[in-house]
Amino acid sequence: MRQLFEKLKTASLEEIRGAKNADALRQIEVKYLGRNGEFTVLIKGLKDLPADEKPSAGKLANEIKIALTEAIRGRREILEQETLAQESNTEFFDTTVPGAHYEIGHIHPISQMQYEVERIFGEMGFSIMDGPEMESEYYNFEGLNIPATHPARDMQDTFFVKNKFHDFHGKMVMRTHTSPVQIRTMERYGAPLRIIVPGRVFRYEATDAGHDSTFNQVEGLLIDKNISLAHLKGIMIEFLTRLFGKPIKVRFRPGYFPFVEPGLELDLSCVLCNMKGCRVCKHTGWMEFMGAGMVHPNVLKAGKIDPKIYQGWAFGFGLTRLTMLKYGIDDIRLFSSGNLKFLNQF
Ligand code: DAH
């Protein structure tokens, strides 16, 4: 009896594993486990066994029945998966091939530099301000103490916008510098102030490798009580040292700008030769960096700040020029050229 059971088990399991499809599997199931299946018939014969053999034979029969049912269920699952895979995926798919690469673009080098400058000044407690690129003559010139006789007021230097007039504010111009935002910010927030203003400015000039009609500047303004140029020196040494990642020295030279008094030019130690002398710094060890000075009392007044109580300094440097310096770019026109061979290097 035991041998009969084992033989049946081996044969049926082999058939189940070899079933080619669901129909074939179903037939095998009927053949063994159906009402008149070979296995069912054997079990029915158990009742004729001697009483002492019955329990162990019954146990064996039960185990085999479970094994067969399990094997059929397992085989059915495999067959179902195979059919699914065939239906949904007739083409060969190589999962080891790398995915398609999409060009998603990146941040323009001048914007990258701007974010860096904003980060460093932000860490030193400066707020970032913004202002309109089309300005009134008042904010761009008069309010900044720039007289009508100043060369910047000339049509040859500035883009004037046609037919835009205002009684007090004069004509509209494309701002020639970021300095107008000094007055706008003073008007709106009063003193004390600690801001930088990155932005685009426009000049009516012949373009060459060093000049473009559109470029970027960063304005700085700090207003408080008891402020001196020593604070400006400290802030600029800290800013430039953090930006270039190495110790930078600065020096002041006298300079003239109508909106500061006294006015000055700030040079930084040559970042290329570390003051040993090179072609770029013309063997002086210094590079011109920016204009600055103590804010002129007339400018504070234009911003509704009392010059008897508050004073401060302002500066303006070329963000475009700083980017050229940092990356050794020798033609300013590349920035707005849309030339991907250039832009993709950043
Ligand atoms: N606005 C000046 C320019 O465009 C730069 C400048 C110089 C800004 C001195 C300042 C300053 O705030 O104090 O050339």
Image: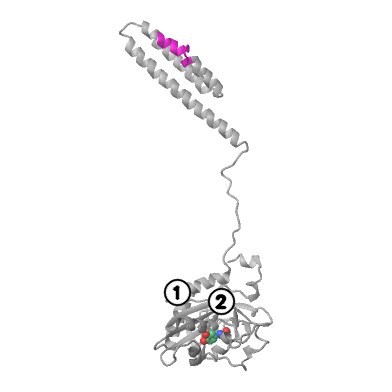
Q: Which residues are magenta?
A: 32-44
Q: Considering the numbered disc 1 on the image, is that residue within a helix, a strand or a loop? A: helix
Cβ at disc 1 under 8 Å from ligand 1? no
The residue that label 2 is drawn on is 199
Q: Amino acid at mark 1?
A: Gly
Quarter of the image with the C terminus in it: bottom right
Residue placed most toward the observer, 153 or 53: 153
Label 1, residues with CA under 10 Å away: few <14, some 14-19, many ≥20: some
Report x, y in % for residue 189. Answer: 45, 81
Spatial distance from mark 2 to mark 1, Cα to Cα?
Answer: 16 Å
Ranked by sequence position, the earlier of labels 2 and 1 is 1
| Residue 142 is inside the magenta segment | no
Q: Is residue 41 magenta?
A: yes
Front residue of this view, candidates 118 and 171: 171
Q: What element does badge 2 sit on?
A: strand
Q: Nearer the viewer, residue 148 or 289?
A: 148
Whether disc 2's CB lies below 8 Å from ligand 1 is answered no
Identify the residue position indicated by label 1 in the image.
122
- Amino acid type of disc 2? Gly
